[in-house]
Image (spheres, grey):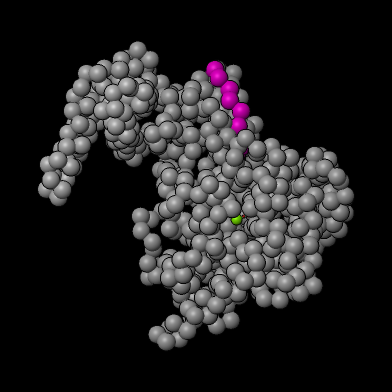
Amino acid sequence: MRTIKGIPVSSGVVIGRVFVIDEGQPRRVVRREVDPADVPAELERFDLARRAAIEELNALHKEAADEMGEEAAKIFLFHIGALSDKAVLGPIRRMIEQERVAAEYACTISLRTLAERFANHPDSTFRTKVSDITDLGARLVGILTGREQQRLSHIEPNTVIVARDLTPSQTAGFDRSKVIAIATDFGGQTSHTAIVARALGLPAVVGLRELTLHARDGQAIVVDSERGQVMLDPDEATLAEAGRDAERAKRSRITLEEGVGLPALTTDGVAIELLGNIEFPTEIPAVLNGGGVGVGLYRTEFLYLTSDHEPTEEEQTREYIDCVKRLGGLPLTIRTLDLGADKYTQQRAETPERNPFLGLRSIRYSLRNTEMFRRQLRAILRASAHGPVRVMFPLVTNIAEFRRAKYFLHESMEDLDESKEAYDREISVGMMVEVPAAALMASSFAREVDFFSIGTNDLVQYTLAVDRINEQVAGLYTPVHPAVLKLIRDVSRVAARAKLPVSCCGESASDPAFAALLIGLGVRSLSVTASSLPRLRMAVRGLDSKRCERIAKRAMSFDSETETAAYVRDRIRKLVPEVFDGRSAE
Ligand code: PEP
Ligand code: MG
């Protein structure tokens, strides 16, 4: 048995079988081992890929010869020749046979070694062929891993997806009747993959660093996100314990769900509005079942991420109206596109950026792609004719951005006036407070916005300079850091003075300890993943707002986040022992 520690991001304990996903980026192919009995099948897999590559290259050669002449097309003949050359194929096959590794890994390593040999060759004819060898490797790996989709459609029940990393849309696309958990090498608590896993109620542990080095398809695995670890080839005792934990977790879920109909009031009678965060309209029933009284954050970028084209204005309108209808009169807060950073992998980004979290993302991206922005704004406005809709802009950092975004909203209103389409003229326009600059300038923004929504996922990362998806610095990602709490306090005070609604829609809001701090800092509206709503309601019902105020005040008085975390954890554990899951607030 091998135990690997990681970061628990979506709760649950499951016992299943490994399914390794390898996206096969040439430099990032994992060393996946195959069972000795599966070596002939792996050799066959390689041969099929080789033949498919030759077919592709023959077609490319013909096309190039027609368009550019035989001389220019010759390059493809070199590639085709290499795919029949023993000097190229021999090492790949030997590696699969002797080291018992997956074909894509053998191709990557063998062709990389060959490319290096060519690069150092005294004869310049060889040196000019280096990029051709690299291309060839990428083509083979692409074909081999392109079959992932096909493999995925044949997975067995009780599958645990193991990968270096997963995009949020990949995670959202898994067949939930078969996939019971995910475990990845990379990632952090508030990465969007983690958020989607929570939204789907899919147990997940990320940041496992070397898991893919050891995991093999079909291997038995326990994913224990209560303890933040996975066990490969679990022994009997571990399996028995995991079974008991799974049972206990189920019972506790049932108890929490029984409280869903109860009002979200603190013990001293302060009402806390509980809303849901969604990525897809289909999550709305879960929000309502969890007792949510509306949607506080609709991450519309998922509409773009799960489609191979930019959704048209019509498609967006349909989607937003669908949400409004499903909510039956409860409010829907639509956040405009928050693309960039972790939502596109760097391979998919239009122009990979050196520092994507500080780059062209969110409102910056929309203000650079204004036609697209206007299509989205018109769709939001059109949906507002069907029920209560609010619009919110992400990552606003300066007033000019907010004004420009609003200007486009007004232009979109004029477009609809011209085409005589109905919309809500009084639509509320708010902003996310998720960078320290916005928090510090809250009083200036308060003169122009209708509401604030504090996004702690990003606020924490930008305040503490800790990448929210980098497992190497996950220990430094501390929402209870006094610096973060002081920013939240300031925003909350400004909002109270200006009589503006303020909510918190970051993941930390679902942690009972952090929720207590938010209540203590004056926040009265919390928006979280649907699956977190029952536990959060239970926490609210066990808290006293005045006591929360005192805890928050004390928490801000410490010099270090470790003291704050220990103090808060201790206090809340005593106040609401039944709901404290002990995960965050560290
Ligand atoms: C946040 O940053 O806290 C937030 C809610 O937005 P996202 O997680 O989509 O960046
Ligand atoms: Mg954010």
Q: Residue at x 80, y 66 (%)?
A: 493
Q: Is residue 7 magenta?
A: yes
Let me know if residue 353 appears in the view.
yes
In the foreground, 229 or 375: 375
- The N terminus - image quarter: top right
Q: Residue at x 42, y 33 (%)?
A: 27
In the foreground, 447 or 203: 447
When the figure is inspected, residue 192 is found, relative to residue 487, above or below; the finding is: above
Give x and y (percent) for residue 281: 47, 60
Horizontal side of 240 relative to 584 (left or right) equals left
In the foreground, 470 or 126: 126
Q: Is residue 9 magenta?
A: yes
Give x and y (percent) for residue 256: 65, 48
Horizontal side of 206 relative to 218 (left or right) equals right
The picture quadrant where one finds residue 61 is top left
Horizontal side of 324 relative to 133 (left or right) equals right
When the figure is inspected, residue 423 is found, relative to residue 167, above or below; the finding is: below
